[in-house]
Amino acid sequence: MIDISPSVMQFLLAFIVVAPLLGAATALPPAPPGLRGSSPDQAVLRHGVTVAGAILIAAIVLALGFDHDQPSRMQATTDISWIAALDVRIHLGVDGISLPLLVLTALLTFLCALYSYFKPPAGPSPRAFVALLLVLESGTLATFAVLDLLLFFLAFEMVLIPMYFLIARWGGAERQAAAWKFILYTLLGSVVMLLGLLLVGLHAGTFDMVALATDNGSGLSKSVQVTAVLAIGIGLAVKTPMWPLHSWLPDAHTAAPTVGSVLLAGVMLKMGTYGFVRIVLPIVPDGTRTFAPYLAAFAVVGIIYGSLACLALARRGAGGDLKRLIAYSSVGHMGFVLLGIASMTPTGVNGALFANVAHGLITGLLFFLVGALKDRYGTADLDTLAGATGAALYGRAPRLGGLLAFAAVASLGLPGLAGFWGEMLAMFGAFDPAPGLSRPAFLTFTAIACFGTLLTAAYLLIVVRRVCMGATRPAAGAEETGPMPELADVQGYELAAWTPLVALTVLAGLWPAVLLGLTDPAVQKLLAGGKS
């Protein structure tokens, strides 16, 4: 770690939030003649890589300057009055809960920008694509950095329009319907969430999230807390997404371009679960305790539902799309995150936060890999990939096949990889929930979640067997259609975009204390009502 002055830390955090907007504004005009390179399109894509790279460097420096001995303390804080009549403030800060998500967002956006430079998505102007990508990054980073309820809402909403256009303009088949479904679901959920946030802020007399967490709901009646949790929770559950409010997700992922799917799964879904941890748990604890068993029940239904949907898509003859399958797997994985949060224990919440980061790394890698398969085959249909002239990736493109198998076993929670620790800790938290919660009910939820891990392993191993181990020639009795077409293995730019995700998945799996050492003190303080 390095010693950085508080004023520089303040600047770094403000830069991380604001710089993507400046980068988006400068991406729209044509590049000066001397900076156009081989083509204007390449120039603007290079601009996106440069801006995203600068933000990633700033996020890494911020992480290095972060005081790891006091991860429960808000650091790099800025607190400026904005709307004095409502006590709304431009309040920024970072602690052990938000820091990993800031770095994850900066990393995934940079990798997406790098990937797009070499493999631009088919669609309209690259200038608009880069600008939307950077606006999306700014909104996501702001969500994890702001400490005011109304600013949180604005940042939460800021990501919707860029993601809508990324799906609608650069997506695949059925992209218009998928984009509309995405925007309608999330906007309707957000309207309800805004009512809950206003209810809390107006009753408490402040929208400051730190002050509200320190009060720990002492200034809010039980009825206000219950109403606020219901309203805020609906908006957060749509974004998470929680069953049964998840149905926009498979369509959005299936239609989105590769980088859209990576960012949607890797960082946007985390905004919902982060809101549960940052707002719902500490600010309205009595209301959360009332709804915790219902949240856990919906979580485990989502785990089983997502796994069964994936099994149905993976079976032979189902015509399942591999991108759609991974989208449904996210419903199950985020169910584990919600189960850990519902336990209201330090173990469960730490597991939820760990699973958040692990899911971002692993599912981001999976969507990159499926995008590469789709580019090579022109389809992500599982029956086509596993047919008589199927992928057989181990034999035809061994590096690509090996990476797909690695991502699959990481996603199913193989010990030693990042996917294991979050789900295990979430179930440990549910096994012994917080006082006041029904232990028999949570034991039942834990047992159901354990069964869900078996289903997860089943569908992911089926996918690996069908896609990676298929025949490299037509099956006996099938019509010979000539020599198999050449299949390019992993390219240099793909290796550059994917290697960090592989390395961090292994690092987090072998050394979980790196992440848990940041989150645990902050979670302990949060659940104790702001007291270390």
Image (cartoon, rainbow, N blue to C red):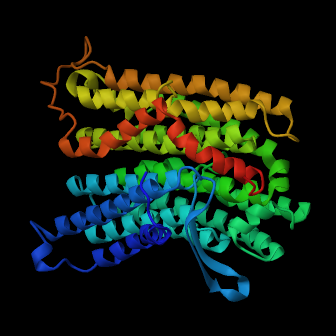
- Residue at 75%, 55% in the rendered image: 531
Is 1 left, or right, of 479 in this rendering? right
- Residue at 33%, 31% in the rendered image: 403
Q: How many marks?
A: 0
- Residue at 28%, 27% in the rendered image: 391
226, 94: nearer the viewer: 94
Residue 19 at least partly seen? yes
Is 420 left, or right, of 394 in this rendering? right
Q: Quadrant of residue 152?
A: bottom right
In this rendering, the answer to whether 27 lies above or below 258 is below
In this rendering, the answer to whether 21 lies above or below 294 is below
254, 149: nearer the viewer: 149
Q: Residue 301, image x and y in percent?
A: 69, 37
The residue positioned farthest toward the bottom in the image shown? 85
105, 378: nearer the viewer: 105
Q: Residue 251, image x and y in percent?
A: 49, 50
- Residue at 86%, 40% in the rendered image: 435
Residue 252 at least partly seen? no
Q: Residue 183, image x and y in percent?
A: 54, 64
188, 312: nearer the viewer: 188
Q: Residue 496, image x and y in percent?
A: 25, 44
Q: Quadrant of residue 356?
A: top right
